[in-house]
Image (spheres, rainbow, N blue to C red):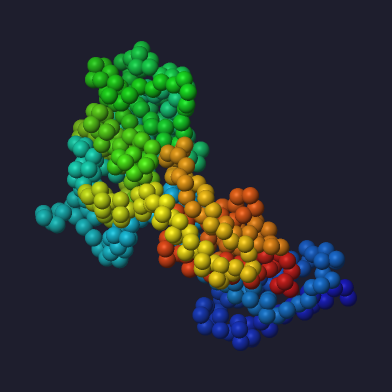
Amino acid sequence: MNKKQQILSSIPSVDELLKLDEIQILCTRYSRNIVLNCVREYLNEYRRLVLSLKEEDLKQVEYKQETLLDGIAVKLHKTMSNKLVNVINATGVVLHTNLGRAVLSEKAKESLWRIACRYSNLEFELETGKRGSRYSHVEDIICRLTGAEAAMVVNNNAAAVMLVLGTMAKDKEVIVSRGQLVEIGGSFRVPDVMVQSGAVLKEVGATNKTHLWDYEAAATENTAALMKVHTSNYRILGFTKEVESEELVELGKKLNIPVIEDLGSGVLLDLQKYGLPYEPTVQSAVKAGMDVVTFSGDKMLGGPQAGIIVGQRQYIEKMRKNPLTRAFRIDKLTLAALETTLKLYLDEETAMKEIPVLRMLTISKEELHKKAKRLYGKLLKRVGDKCSIAVIDEFSEVGGGSMPMHKMPTKAVSVTVPNLSIDKLEEALRDYTTPVVGRINKDRFIIDVRTVFEEEIDIIVEALAWSLKGEHSISALESGDML
């Protein structure tokens, strides 16, 4: 009998494993059927791994029942755990699309939880006792903040643009500058959204230069709207020209054609005073006279995923009657979080202090350094004998397709481990109970403290300590230690 056959013959049967005290304990926590299925699946994976190993890899391998049981417990835990979990964003990208973009404020979280757990007046007017509109809960506050005449909310900004165009320009032309035909992420492009809305795209100008007369010359009796798209996720530099909002509005009035602006990120405060680049605010677009403006709720605004539409009441009312509105409508949880977030903007100081996105974007260098030193000190004490740790200068990004050229100086903690590849370390940290997602730079694991919450520092320390023990299932299984 060769070594591979010896190991395979040592593996207990399913029935034998089910009789063990360790498995019986698992059966008390979960149902027996769930444990039984996990045991069967894990044993099949275990056998396939043994069969895949080369003979030379088997020389130092011995079957260990305790590691087999540990593997079953890990698989069971992963099976029963939610797939959608909290992670620690140590990348320094504030609006990280893959990690959920904007983090909600504590007040928004409280509102969301309160509404989620009880019935609410979502579409019920308490004053009259009759059916109401879900949009009424946020329309007043949006109009108050932006200066718009009317407002409504859908589930994201792409849906907002589609609804606007489908209502105002179905089967008619919409004139857009070639330099503004952006891809908004996930391969969704403005031209594609326009096609789905039923509007007919009419491109004008060149990639780098578009003039007012380009729009005017292209307008016909079949033109339903002039459209301006803010290029929030890229910049064209050098020999460039684009038409200002006020100019386009004047042309729209002259031609009696409505003007639409898609702002994308949705900035409600002028952040230049806090050291950030200029971004057009929603208020500036409304003040310029735009008939309809669309923007996101989960980017620079710092709220939940939503597409917000503001503008002239005559157009908003038509959108509310569009059948697409029901398909794109937001639920009570989004409304609860959005209303609370918007109310924080009634006082700028409060917004800057309590909305995590704004706080992360404007945190001082001194605070970043203090936070990095706190993390460094705790890591040094816990795992300083096992790895090399340092506080370094780095750069953070806004993310979410916002301020693409802006790099924010930040402080980070770098980690390198002798005899362990950075890729394996990064993989292990992602495999921790609360995954830690950082970035790799020059064979160092980088933890950018800008996007790390104070209460997450101790979790990072424990995650790194756990990773260095080599107990996580992926690396242990691949190395053969679990045989």
* Residue at the right extreme, as displayed: 1
Q: Which of 222 and 256 is in front in this view?
A: 256
Q: Which residue is drawn at 73% across and 79% down?
A: 64
Is residue 331 something that shows in the picture?
no
Q: Nearer the viewer, residue 288 or 117?
A: 288
Q: Residue at x 47, y 26 (%)?
A: 237
* Residue 425 sits above or below residue 102 on the image: below
Q: Nearer the viewer, residue 418 or 142?
A: 418
* Residue 482 sits above or below residue 247 on the image: below
**Residue 417 picture location, percent across and down:** 65, 62
**Residue 335 picture location, percent across and down:** 29, 52
Is residue 354 something that shows in the picture?
yes
* Residue at the front extreme, as displayed: 366
Q: Is residue 174 left or right of residue 289?
A: right
* Residue 320 sits above or below residue 376 on the image: above
Q: Residue at x 55, y 81 (%)?
A: 27
**Residue 441 picture location, percent across and down:** 60, 50
